Structures are given as structure tokens and as C-alpha cells.
Amino acid sequence: MLFRGFNFKDRSPQHHKPKQGQFYFETNCIVYLFEQFLPKLHFDDVSSVQFECYPNAELACQPVIMDGLLPVTIPYDVSDFYQLSDLEKKKKTLDLMMDGLKVICKDKDWDEEPFLYAYQKVAEKNYTFKKTYKKPKSSPNRKLKAKIEIEIGIYDCTASLVVEDKEQKHIYSEVLYQEKPRFDLLYPLLGDIKWVGNNEVRVHERKPCEHQFKTVYLQ
């Protein structure tokens, strides 16, 4: 099975669904960043891993793989998570991931090396997810290039149009969309980049809504 990634689940009995959802969203930035540094992985019976945080591990059930999803119990009181600073939340998320992965690697005899590499790279990137999405497009006069930059933080995920000159000097940028920290919420909105003259750029949505677009005028 092709491995598709991770997510977190708050299993604290004192937290209602909105609070549990908050934990899922606030851990996504590190989950996405971690996944960026993994190679394509294939496992016999696992396509995704869910880290389930229980304040008391005795509350957890015996993990059962269903439809490729492997739940992994992590003893952690999520209430403590909300007392942390933003940077501390990112570091804690990464550490919780590795705690769970060490258990999995031992139980299922997975190679730990790809996960240790990703762990190190996340720290090297200062726990910040920022990447260029799609190949940059040149203006008609070839003096400028426009690209879409994705940034995923603890509280939101943004897509910005960034314009640079030939020397990659920043000329202009503008936030196009801002959503909760889940890239799939942005994906349908990010289609083709098209220049209209040398001072106007359009970012079209994906099919079947490609006739809809946002326009950016360079100032």
C-alpha cells in the first residue's frame, strides 16, 4: 500500500468536538512539513497513521488497522498543548510524532531512518512550512515571473501570489486565499497562472470552475 500520511486525534474525554478539531488543525502544519521530507513509502497493510492522544493510556482500545488506517496511542493530555506558545506547539507536535513512530517502527519492523531524516529536516526549516506551488510563469515581456507560494501555519493556510524579477528580487506579493490549515481546502482554488499584459496576473481556479479567477494588479 502506498503510504499517504499522518494526522492527530484528540481523545481527551473532557474535550468536545470543536476542541478536538482544533487540535487536529493546529498540528497539521508540522504534519505537512514532516511529510515533505519523506520518500514514497509502501507498507503491506498501512496507508496512513493516526496519532491518538489520550490523557490516560488506559482509556485506549487495542489498535486495529481498518482500511489501511493504523491508530497509535500516545499518552498525552492535549489540555497541556493549549498552554504552549506557537513554537512550542510545533516542537511538541514533532516530538509526539516521533514518539508514535518509534513505537510503530518497533512493532511493525519499519525502517526508522526516513522518519529520523524528516525529523531533522523539520527542525532545520525552523518548523516553518513554506513552498512554491506550481512552476513560475513569465510576463509577456519576460521581465517578471509570478508564482504561488503556500504557507501553512498553526491557525491558517495561505496562498499568495508572489512576483519577482529575473534576479529573483521581490517585486510584489498579495494573499489570494486564506483557509484553515488544510491544503485540500486551497487546492481547488489554485489552477493556472495567466498574465494579462505586463502588469496584471490572473490565478484561475481548477476545473470545472476554471472560468473563475482572482486578479492581481501590480502596483
Image: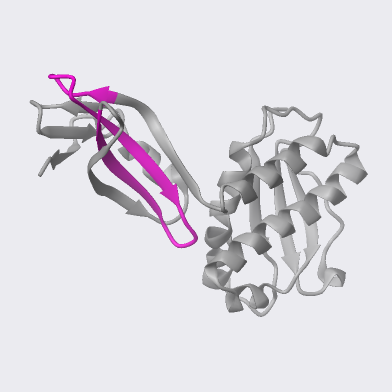
Give the main secondary structure of the magenta stretch.
strand
Residue 206 in percent (x, y) is at 31, 31
Residue at the (31%, 32%) spot, across then down:
168
For residue 162: magenta? yes
Question: Is 211 left or right of 100, judged from the image as shown?
Answer: left
If the image is split into quadrants, where does the N terminus sit?
top right
Question: Is 76 left or right of 139, judged from the image as shown?
Answer: right
Give whichever of 6, 60 is nearer the camera.
Answer: 6
Q: Quadrant of residue 26?
A: bottom right
Residue at the (80%, 56%) spot, across then down:
99
Question: Is 33 left or right of 156, judged from the image as shown?
Answer: right
Residue 179 in percent (x, y) is at 37, 54
Q: What residue span does the magenta drawing correspond to?
A: 137-165
Question: Is 112 left or right of 158, judged from the image as shown?
Answer: right
Residue 102 in percent (x, y) is at 84, 49
Give whichever of 137, 15 is nearer the camera.
Answer: 137
Give whichever of 10, 98 is nearer the camera.
Answer: 98
For residue 186: magenta? no
Q: Quadrant of residue 134?
A: top left
Residue 58 in percent (x, y) is at 87, 71
Give whichever of 149, 208 is nearer the camera.
Answer: 149
